[in-house]
Image (spheres, rainbow, N blue to C red):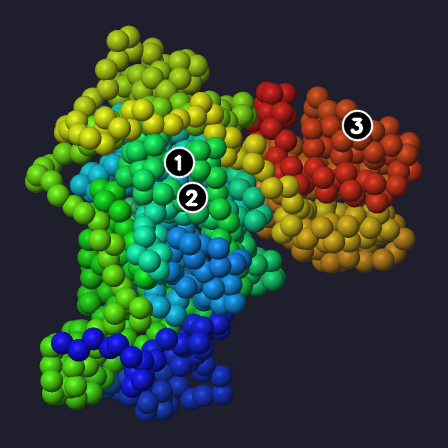
Amino acid sequence: MKEQEDKGNLKENKPNVNENSKNKQLEQFREDSKDQFMTTDQGVRVNHTADHLKAGPRGPLLMEDFHFREKMTHFDHESIPERVVHARGSGAHGYFQAYDDSLKEFTKAKFLTEPGTRTPVFVRFSTVVGSRGSADTVRDVRGFATKFYTEEGNYDLVGNNMPPFFIQDANKFADLVHAIKPDPDNEMPQASAAHDTFWDFASLMPESMHMIMWVLSDRAIPRSFRMMDGFGVHTFRLINEAGKACFVKFHWRSLLGSHSLVWDEAQKLAGKDADWLRRDLWEAIEMGDYPEFELSVQIVPEEDEFKFDFDLLDATKIIPEELVPLRPVGKMILNRNPDNFFAETEQVAFHPGNLVPGIDVTNDPLLQGRLFSYIDTQLNRFNSANFGEVPINRPITTTHNHQGAGFMRHTINKGKVNYWPNSLGGGCPMMAPGNMGGYIHHMERVEGHKIRGRSESFNDHYSQATLFWNSITEPERKHIVKAAHFELGKVMSKEIRQRMLGHFNKISPELAQRVSEGIGVEIPKNFEPEKSDNNYVADDASKKIKKGKSVKETDFVSMEKHKIETAKSRQIAILLEDGYDYCEVMQVKSALEAAGAHAKIVSKFHGMRKASSGEEIETDKSHITTASIMYDAIYIPEGEEHIKALLKEGDAIHFVNEAFKHCKPIATSGNGIALLQKASVLGIDFADENSQDVLTDSGVVTAGNDADADEFAAAFINAIKKHRHWDREEKMMVPA
Ligand code: HDE
């Protein structure tokens, strides 16, 4: 019917977008009970809510008690099904802003090319395997899903914190998830891959080997949602104004760098603070330490599709940055916590098929399956197709279509006409041509025989796993080996352990050897991986890609080689008892704060701690309410009485010892060195207590009592910037 060609009589549904557009929209739905009477859902004021209506003070409930029935009914229906994967998550609002318009050459998506616009976003970070109440710090992939509320409608970039994926085809997803989730008979273990079913599946799934390397690496135990990178994983398409397409991979880089916990710390945090990552994100935003991520793209012209030694449509592969460098596009800042967890973080519904003009999908068989699953899964969660009307899911543009009825419809569509084409409604709502924002799918030529199979070009499962192993540093390798000792050590079946060694041996004989030492089985001879029923078909693509470009190492996958060194937003514990040196504490504290770190006073008990010169500082945390695992670094000032007290305090000695074993920066001066000795800080050179020296050895900074406090603080901040000092791992016999 009618296609709108001139803008003359068109009511523009494209808002003037700024960073507050979404917030303004949400404001209409907020409720504030301050200074209000309680009411029923019907708006009737409630006069008493502590007792239900009874037949006599000791009698039964009366059915006519509408207030009780309404209240109880609501409570009984408060929960919705948790997400089948990514059930546990944390959300934050913010905005995205492009740096410039240089991406116009490749895409017509306005939010990526208009530097003057701040596009509102809502991000949900998540773990994948655990249920809603599981611990944050388990070994797992992290979800990194972003909803951009653009002036052209919602665009969702639903990514992870690791760039490859376990499988190539969506038809294996249900099996993968069944295998990694708790066992069906006893629902154990919670939020962990370390059980027979997952490794059984993985060991029969050679295509998962590249991802397995990432999952065993420290990326799977991030220090913070704010300190991890994000990846779109699939190859998508960008389309420019002229309709020309190119391939694209999306990357988020944390501007605080990508940092991890150590495994022992992650396990302890799961017990002492199961909300560790959620709390970290919430508190950082409340304090004004807004998480920042840079969006970059890797662009591959369509004509270069086969110029690599892997298939761009294979989601188990990365494009090494040496082959296609990252091109920065813009920055996202998360600056507002949600008002209500359920209404926003739980109800937000992402979908990789939420696309705007200028961005399109490819035939990646994993992505294609996702295009079905995400809407389908929302129907299970919301029991209605109207989930898009929930405030957090609404676009900031107005919506016009005939998809009216269904459970929980909010919008009141006017008029008789709920069909298209129509003449009674003047042909409205109208079709929008491409030059007026109508979404036009990329006109890719497609032809082929119906086949349950995939191109032979997907049939290389080890090269990039080897590339990963070859590209990382020795401490990172060591952590992978230890992770494999743990994960496979929990596997009862020796056959499964051995099959995994067969794969590791194909990735790297050194890796296999080192893992084999810890899991009590030999590397199998003449190992041939299972074909796992894949039907690989030789086709044109497979002939072409074999000649493609490759690299032997790619530094960018290593967290250690690509450290952003900053002390910003790091948590520093200052151990204090009465009798400390006030001037030194204040000088170091203000230097830490100037570097963007946060210092917290930790003492035996809550209350005021008195300096040797009489000043007082209030304790933030007592030993029983905190632990070294909750800090990035620790500092112990000098002071005669204060150190004497710490030397008698088991908790303080353990605090120092544990932080040392977790490779964290530690600083002390003067007689504080005695506390390090008592805490078995071994194999480290200390400064002479009675000197002006400042000495840093493996992240342990010590200063003589005549040293310059500024120099001392600067050395400490440098050690903090390096995050962890892995060389200590070599020196330690007894674990933390
Ligand atoms: Fe998802 N995934 N996924 N996934 N995924 C879901 O959708 C699915 C995959 C990712 O914070 C579900 O709304 C299939 C890759 C994130 O709400 C479900 C396949 C990547 C989130 C689903 C994949 C992801 C989900 C569950 C293989 C990284 C959390 C709840 C074909 C690029 C979003 C929901 C949030 C959630 C299906 C693979 C990321 C069931 C079928 C690859 C970050 O629809």
Q: Which of 370/308 is in front?
A: 308
590 and 229: which one is in front?
Answer: 229
Q: What amino acid type is highlighted by mark number 2? A: Gln
Task: Locate residue 274, reporting x and y percent.
Answer: 46, 49
Q: Is residue 202 visible?
A: no
Disc nearer the start of the sequence (1/2): 2
Nearer the camera: disc 3 or disc 1? 1
Q: Determine contact: label 1, label 2, CB under 8 Å.
A: yes
Q: Which mark is residue 270?
A: none
Estimate the spatial distance between the alpha carbons at disc 3 and disc 1, rounded to whole Å. Answer: 46 Å
Question: Which residue is denoted by mark 2 in the rendering?
Answer: 298
Count the marks: 3
Circle 2: element type:
strand
Tell me the residue that label 1 is attached to: 319
Q: Which residue is mark 3?
A: 686
The residue carrying pointer 1 sits among few (fewer than 14), some (14 to 19) or many (20 or more) residues within 10 Å by Cα, namely: many
Residue plotted at (45% across, 81% down): 32
In the rendered structure, which amino acid carries the disc numbered 3?
Phe
Q: Is residue 353 left or right of residue 641?
A: left
Q: Amino acid at mark 1?
A: Ile
